Image (cartoon, helix red, strand yellow):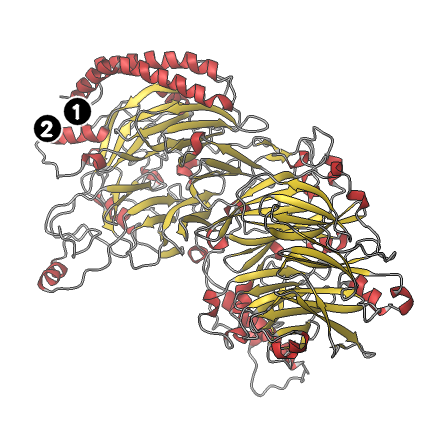
Amino acid sequence: MALFTRHTDKSIVAVSAELNDEADWQTGILRHFDYHLNVCAFAFEPVIGLLAVGTTKGLVDIHGAPGVHVRLLVNDNAKINLLQFATSLSRLLCVDEHDRLYVWDLTTPGKPRLQKIMNYRHPVTALALSPSHQHAFIALANGEVHTYDLLCSRSSPYTMPNLWRLYEEKMVARGASLSPSDPSVSHIPLDLMVHPRDLNLLFVVYGGGVVLSDLSQRNILRAYELELPPGAPGGAGYAAPDLLTSRKPSVTAFAVHPSGHILAIGHADGSIAFWALEDEDKPVLVRTLDEDDTNLVDADKLNEMLSTHHSPPAPREPIFKITWSGFPNSSDPRGGETTLTVLGGLRSDEPPGVTAYLFPPLNPGEPPSPVDPSAGLHPFFRAAIKRSLSPINVHTYITNGITQDFLLIPRDSPHFSGTWDPVSILVMSEYVGRTRAVEAYEFPPTSFTSKVASTSVLHADDVTHPLESHPTIETDPIEDLTSELADTLEFMQGTDDPRSLRLPSSLWTGANGVVDGQLIALERDAYETLVDDREISDTYELPLCGGVAWVEDFEGEMKLMKLQPRRIFMTNHRDLTIRFQDISSQLLVSSSTSPLKYSFPSPLPILTIDLTSALSDPAIVTRTSPKFIDEAQIASVHLATESLECAAVLHTGEVILYRLIHSGGLHHPEDAELVSLHHIPALPGNRFRPAFAILSGMGSATAFAISDIGFMSVAYTSGLLFIIDMRGPRVLARFTPEARSSFLSRKDHADCISSLTWTVSCTAADPTYRVLLIATLESGSSTIYTLIRSQSGSWTVKNSPESAEATSHPIPGGSIVIDGKNGNRCRANRGGLATALASSLEDTEVRKTVWISAGAKGVKCTVNITGERIERVDWGSKVGKVERVEVVHKNAAAVLVAFTDKRQVLVYSLPYLELLHTLHLEQLPTSSLVTDTTGDFIEFTRHPPSGLISKAIYGTLFDIRRSGPYAPPTVNFTDEKRVIPPQPQPVSIAPTSYFTSWIGYITSQGMTGEQVDALLAGPDRPVAQPTPKGHTSAEAASGSPGSAYGAYTAQAQGIAASAATTASNLYSRLGAALSERTEGLGQLQESFDSLEQGSRKMLAQTKSLAAQQTAKRWFGF
């Protein structure tokens, strides 16, 4: 309520008339921006160029070309366990924690269509897909492998029993004794992988070992099981308690060499066993990350360990994941150098990360003796395989927290399980507060491909004879020193470490996580200057190029977007970076014929500021503590909206100023608190450069303000206030608490400055417009400092500052000076400076200003800062706590807007503070809010344990004919037809001349993708839509069918196929009806899945009988 009589000065007029109508106001949410701190799965589609990310809350985000972004949800917000793309049909497959398989069709225009939800009775442990056929292999925890027809959206009748149980039963029947192991581990399939060069072969990775199965013959071809003899160290080393016993470490990971001839099997003890595909009897090599031949007994080391008491080394991690990558780097059909990428295997006292090994090519010559295909692997080739496993180089991608997963991003091929010719790697790791961090790097590491030139070799032209005379060239020693320092910095920055790559903003997590942000409205000229050069190509990003997107203009609102102000979203991050994103409405202007060109918001990486380069400079390091850079955190960031100078304030009080255009400066500022940083060049690809730093050592900063005319001010907890001319730089004035004591009723060092405001205004005592700094204490006592310009152009601070009284406990945005006639802000910018320089007594008699001072209890308006109070109101207890105020300008009017913690928005007229409207924001669990001068705002949801922002909600107070273009865009992932590369063909391990005599593979009935689909789907496959064009398939090499252990009998096959077909036919009729429904009928679809399960239970006895008969006949018994 108003407490004082209205001011009657006619030069002060109401400036809110155009916003009095309640119809002008409507709150609304425009966009949600998520920062996924809980990523748990990811997948990449290289043919289209899409990245899918799954979270523990059931979200699946698909990222493609700029503007292409789709969000999918699974039922019950269930955690995403598995995520894979089916390249052959452009599908996305997902398995959640409730073992439901979701299949989305990416070819549907607008948004991917949920094609199927499939329930499984047992936990789903693995998925395997091939770009050459249209089926998915699905491994279940009971050891079985099922198949799913992606084209017909149904389960196929082809299933595989628990092959490891059958293998163990066969071994027992032969008289072999099984080592005691937990069947719950050894019988669980951990992974599935189609042979990279033979579609008829499928690897099933169990905890006990790896089984190679022939799909067409339905038999086991090979089984690879590692057994360590007594005394062999294995991965646990010679300090293992069971060293003197025979051991079979559990299998944990699997990969295949690009040639298809070598297998890499990771184990729980941290060792990797390398097997030749043709030899299941013994591995070629067993090693850990740092030691070879760990499956062999070293008598000397064994005796040493048994005779002495050494402290055991730190335990070694299991091998969690392995990939084996090839590259098109050789004319030899067998390939060139390869990389083996390993997650795990490190000791607990080593930094966590992902280890990459560079291996030599597997290109052996002609064997010295003839090759007998019936004799198995030739010793010559076995030795060649072992030589190809000797690392040439190694690199570890180190993470801050425990590494959880990684994903290789191939250039364009989906074959070889997505590991062929990778160009980057995603690494997922743990971060503070039970969050996950995702980072992207170049792959392979630069050290694997770069050749370091010797720095000791000089060209002949560069050598100067000591007696040879040369003309003397005068140079500027300062320029020489600057150039030398720049060259030295460039040399020091040269490193073989892989470059970090940019990720979509939703993956700004971990050290890249968002700590705070600001929404800034810019004038057109400043905006265009800031976003200049945004078109410069930047290769340091993921190859996301899939699809096109546009916004449908159903309500005809698109044309209004061009009239909106330009806006920038500025964020500061945990890794001491400041990033800029364009959040202007103009980015959304698009149509089906003119799709989006940029993401929304659109990152501006060329503007990124990285404080670490400045904070690690000797000029700062020598004046700070050794732990300074490790403990540094950004407290606040301030951007001058016209001059575009950016200042970062650290928690410990240091201030770093950056400029777009380096204007030089003093090499040695006269003031001890100032440190010139002009010698530090801008980082490659960045436009902001450090100018200088303030190192006061007076505690943390309590307030900061920057102007557009070269002045800044900073106040500290010690009570010290600096006023700085940034053009020197030089300190114009230092004010201590004692120097300000004459303006206080008592000395109170605890009463710190909590608000600083630059303005161009007059005061009641001085009617001339001048550059002023308003410094307000927590108690409300304020001091107005006046800057005077001399005839020579230098600036000084007037010796006798004025005092004023503000509202106590200032709140963010709570100190603003506006023009008394039009409500425009009286900024300290170029226009304001021109006004001050041209100011005269005649002007000030008619031009009055209004100082708006808002605090925790209320707000008041004062004429000319130190003059008569116009009005004052208290917030009142019913509205809650006012957290922020903003003067909003619209339609040539200005109002004061106050945001409360009860989600209310109070709109007051200016300058008379009449309550015009009370608006209500949507009830959301947000923790902070930032605003701009146009009525738009962004609310942040913070993740308390980590302190990072997990969601940003972009809203407005004027949601009238505005929200339509902000709706999720229409997406077409298959706009550009891309061709799937042909299926890789088998290659011989021997030279080409030996190909006709011995290919080196297990004899298998090679199959095409169409033949695999026909085999898995069975004879009753429903008629489906044709496969999209562009798939090039190649015939795999065929051979005579062979069996190592026998096959199904016709009787068992008939019983199992009949039972499965009966159930699948019932389900196919139900599924056909359900396929026409939308995603909202997902629960209904699950009901029919349950009906399928019921039909399967009716046949359980029949299938059990078939399984019993089959188990005896797999091995010919």
Q: Are marks 1 and 2 in contact (CB under 8 Å)?
A: yes
Q: Badge 2 is on which residue?
A: 173
Q: CA distance from mark 1 to mark 2?
A: 10 Å
Assess disc 1: are there few (<14), some (14-19) or many (≥20) residues with their C-alpha within 10 Å of its C-alpha: many
Callout 2: SS: helix
**Looking at the image, is mark 1 or mark 2 nearer the viewer?**
2
Numbered circle sitting on residue 369 = none
Q: Badge 1 is on which residue?
A: 1115
> Which residue lies at the image location 74% right of the left edge and 78% below the top edge?
800
Residue 1069, quarter of the rendered image: top left
781 horizontally vs 981: left or right: right
> Which residue lies at the image location 59% right of the left edge and 38% below the top edge?
922
Q: Give residue 369's position: percent from left, percent from top.
A: 22, 43
The amino acid sitting under disc 1 is Phe
The amino acid sitting under disc 2 is Ala
Assess disc 2: are there few (<14), some (14-19) or many (≥20) residues with their C-alpha within 10 Å of its C-alpha: few
Residue 998 in sight from this viewpoint: no
Q: Is residue 520 above or below residue 598?
A: below
Residue 720, quarter of the rendered image: bottom right
Of all residues shown, which one is farthest toward the right?
A: 842
> Which residue lies at the image location 40% right of the left edge and 37% below the top edge?
417
Q: Give residue 861's position: percent from left, percent from top.
A: 75, 58
Query: In the depicted view, which residue is nearer to us: 758 or 37?
Result: 758
